[in-house]
Image (spheres, rainbow, N blue to C red):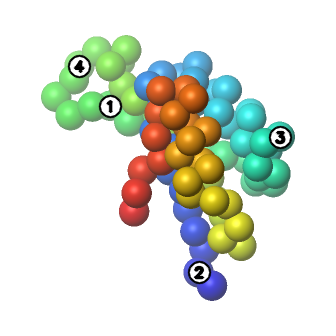
Amino acid sequence: MSDVRHVLVLPDRDAADEVAQELSDRFGVSEEPQLVRDALAGEDDAEDAQWLVVVEDPDGRLDPSALDAFAAGYDGWLETP
């Protein structure tokens, strides 16, 4: 099985930080999620950036629908590949 990477899109840095911290408690994610600032196209204001939380799932054991529902609680979503 190939490595799976899940990308959660969050509205701001605070939400991304909270989600990254909760992932290990809630889903047993062992590897530290990566936070990436994603500036929206054409936006100059840093406040308009979305944040991505990248979760490595080498065993493919995380449930995408559960991750999507989890991110929705923070006004975010799971990016579909």
Element type at mark 1: loop
- Which quadrant is the N terminus positioned in? bottom right
Separation of residues labelled 1 and 3 (CA atoms) = 28 Å
Separation of residues labelled 3 and 2 (CA atoms) = 25 Å
Separation of residues labelled 1 and 4 (CA atoms) = 8 Å
According to the picture, the residue beneath numbered tag 4 turns out to be 44
Separation of residues labelled 4 and 2 (CA atoms) = 37 Å
According to the picture, the residue beneath numbered tag 2 turns out to be 2
The mark that comes first in sequence, 4 or 2, is 2
The mark that comes first in sequence, 1 or 4, is 1
What is the number of the mark on residue 25?
A: 3
Q: Amino acid at mark 4?
A: Asp
- Which quadrant is the C terminus positioned in? bottom left
Residue 41, position in %: x, y?
21, 34
Count the labels in the image: 4
Looking at the rendered image, the disc whose residue lies closer to the viewer, 4 or 2, is 2
Q: Are marks 3 and 2 in contact (CB under 8 Å)?
A: no
Q: Amino acid at mark 1?
A: Ala
- Identify the image quadrant of residue 17: top right
Q: Amino acid at mark 2?
A: Ser
